[in-house]
Amino acid sequence: MSKSNFDPYAHLGIVFNPDGSITRRLSLPKVEPNPDPVPDNPTVSKDIIINPKTNTCIRIFRPVKIPSNDNTVARLPIIVYFHGGGFILYSACDVVCNQNSSLMASEIPAIVVSVDYRLAPDHRLPACYEDAVDAILWVKQQAVDPEGEKWIKNFGDLSRCYLGGRGNGANIVFHAALRAMDYNLGPMEIRGLLFNQPLFGGVQRTKSEIKLAADPVLPLQVLDVLWDLSLPKGADRDHRFSNPILDGPHKIKISSLPRSLVIGFCGDPTIDRQQQFVQLLELNGVHVEAQFNEVGFHAIDVVDKRRALAVLKITKDFIF
């Protein structure tokens, strides 16, 4: 891949506009929610606006068939989930995101709250972190509100909540978990964090970034553009939103994070940063289960069904 003719914006399917906005040329098919059971679909789903001021909404999924114990409906873990897309692409109702959330809901099984957070550069960081906290507080509120969402109240286990995400969605998990510590979440309890190929960065290049600079999925120039479009204006990649390894106000909270699962693939240019992130958690006393596969690339589980099922099994084993 030649730097002289490579266009990272074209690679991402976007056009950078003079006013700093972007035009997204890549548009995935949208899937409408299905609140009522339909043949061959193991889940039902519905869309709910959780913050009218920001127009932030969620798509909530539950299995059609709820497990039972001794004729008593089993309470399901709740996963608050954040899709990938480098902070700038996709939504919770895109076909890939919808399929992934539906699969988690049916196979784990779980109540999945998929967050349609605001995208950069129209809404730079920390906008999506704020949306994530809104979603967490919304879930908590359903337990204490007599008129709360019935799928949460009737089938969800508020004592077994998890935050999960892929790529930049896993980055959101980290920062949302830290921010959520400032609130009284009871009776909700966040029991674990699910980091699937978490996206982090930094000014100093890592060995994997240099080695895989021309990666066909996530080349270095594309990574730089994603951070340029999403970080606060004037910030570089050593901002704490991108590089949590460096000192900052977030460091004092890390030791209070719940047990964490980190999944990665060694063909991912950001694999070194993912492993540094595991070390950061462990050094702060967080119980971490790290699953790094020697073979695979960033977002391989999006295009390889076998890998998607393997990631799902690792996630299920972690939860149960």
Image: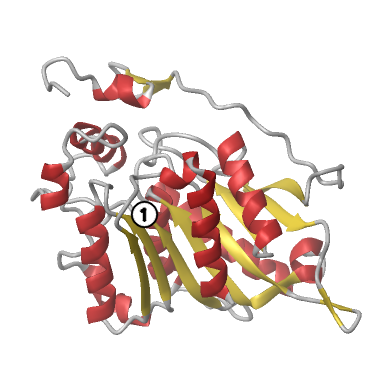
Question: What residue do we see at 23% from left, 19% from top?
Answer: 7
Colour setup of the view: secondary structure
Question: In which quadrant of the rendered view does residue 289 lie?
Answer: bottom left
In percent of width and height, residue 185 lies at 56, 76
Q: Residue at x 16, y 15 (%)?
A: 5
Residue 196 spot, x, y in % from top left: 42, 57
For the residue pair 107 and 176, the one nearer the viewer reads as 107
> Circle 1 — which element?
loop
Amino acid type, label 1 = Gln
Picture coordinates of residue 57 (x, y %)? Answer: 62, 46
The residue tagged 1 is 197
Q: Is residue 12 above or below residue 103?
A: above
Q: Quadrant of the C terminus?
A: bottom right
Q: Is residue 56 visible?
A: no
| 216 relative to 279, above or below | above
Residue 15 visible somewhere in the drawing: yes
Nearer-the-camera pick, 65 or 34: 65
Q: Residue at x 75, y 47 (%)?
A: 46
Which quarter of the image is occupied by the N terminus? Answer: top left
In the rendered structure, the answer to whether residue 177 lies left or right of residue 146 reads left
Q: Residue at x 38, y 69 (%)?
A: 178
Q: In the shown orientation, is residue 289 left or right of residue 224? A: right
Quadrant in the rendering for residue 72? bottom right
Q: How many residues crowd mark 1 within 10 Å: few (<14), some (14–19), many (20+)? A: many
162 relative to 212 in the view: left or right: right
* Residue 261 locus on image (x, y percent): 42, 69
